[in-house]
Image: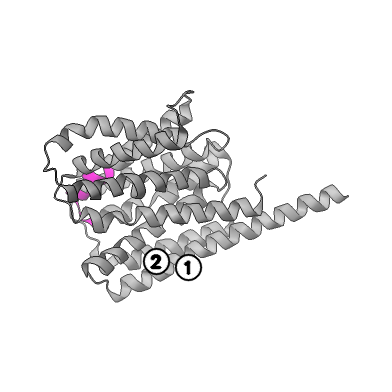
Amino acid sequence: MDSLSERRKAILFLALAAILWSTSGVLVKSLSWSPFAILGGRSIFASLIFLVYLRRLPTQWTRWKVLAAVACILTQFLFVTSTKLTTAANAIFLQYTAPIYVVLLGYWFLREKPSRTDWLSMFIIFLGMFLFFGDKLSTDGLYGNILAVLSGLTSAIMIVSFRAQKDGTPAESFLIASLATAIFCFPFVLKETWTVTNWLIIAYLGLFQLGLAFVFFTIGIKHIPALEANLVGTLEPVLNPVWVFLFLGEKMGTYALFGGLVVLGGVILSAVGSARAANDKTSEVLKTSDV
């Protein structure tokens, strides 16, 4: 059983991953490269991070490892494509319907049953997300909206597949995904303008926003249930426009600011609730051992 200190560290790692993921918006807006070129370029650097971290190529191939890698690739491609076909707000909001699928998949395959606190946290987070993106959501871009919903499903499959490897090496799944994406998208990189500024941004996106973030994520997911990990990850879409505001001056509306605070409250509730539950279980085990 994971200790309370391990759970706290895991939540911290997942929060750091979400913070790093959220920095993509402000930098991607500064790039003139196509989405697939950006994916390919950053995947090259992300692969380097995981090769250094693991110090080896994947050795053992399991169904969960392959499924996590495939779901990771599909999530990235579906999200990029949906963003091109619908509004950015629609794409992000619909992708973060993933907790709904995580509840079902986590229970079916991992036997991780959500608690009352999880349900309450999910409701609060969805309410905050609706407030955050509500004024930008629309019915435009039907095909883009469908792909965004599918990206939420593949995101849930990815998270559950990573969690299923809690006794293994989930980081290898991301290395497989990064290498495959880098190879597939490299032709798009060759078509773009190569400047020092562009490559510095791509390097940051690969090394930190993607690579280091997924190092934190693959460490944290080993100690935290899939649903809770996904709920902590909802910090990403909320923090993304914060960086855009700070560095590019794009202001957020009043509802968006309030919605962001509501999401943050839901994430904190989820983290505190799970920590208390883990503490109670530890206390019960200690009492039983004393008897």
Q: Which amino acid lies under the numbered mark 1 shown in the image of this protein? A: Gly
- Indicate the secondary structure of the residue bearing disc 1: helix
In contact (CB < 8 Å): disc 1 and disc 2: yes
Q: In which image quadrant can residue 151 be found? A: top left
Mark 1 surroundings within 10 Å by alpha-carbon count, few (fewer than 14), some (14 through 19), many (20 or more):
some
- Judged by its main secondary structure, the magenta piece is helix
Is 173 rendered above or below residue 128?
A: above
Mark 2, residue position: 128
- Which residue corresponds to the image point at 48% horizontal and 42% vertical from the top-left? 218
Residue depth check, mark 1 versus mark 2: number of the one nearer the observer: 1
> Seen from this angle, which residue lies furthest right?
291
Residue situated furthest top in the rendering: 60
Snapshot quadrant of residue 81: top left
Q: Is 145 on the left-hand or right-hand side of 212?
A: left
Disc 1: which residue: 265
Q: Which residue is drawn at 59% across and 57% down?
A: 274
Q: Distance between the residues labelled 1 and 2?
A: 9 Å
Residue 68 shows in the view: no
The magenta segment is 78-88
Q: Is residue 34 left or right of residue 21?
A: left
On the image, the x and y values in percent for residue 276 come to: 65, 60
Q: Closer to the N terminus: mark 1 or mark 2?
A: 2
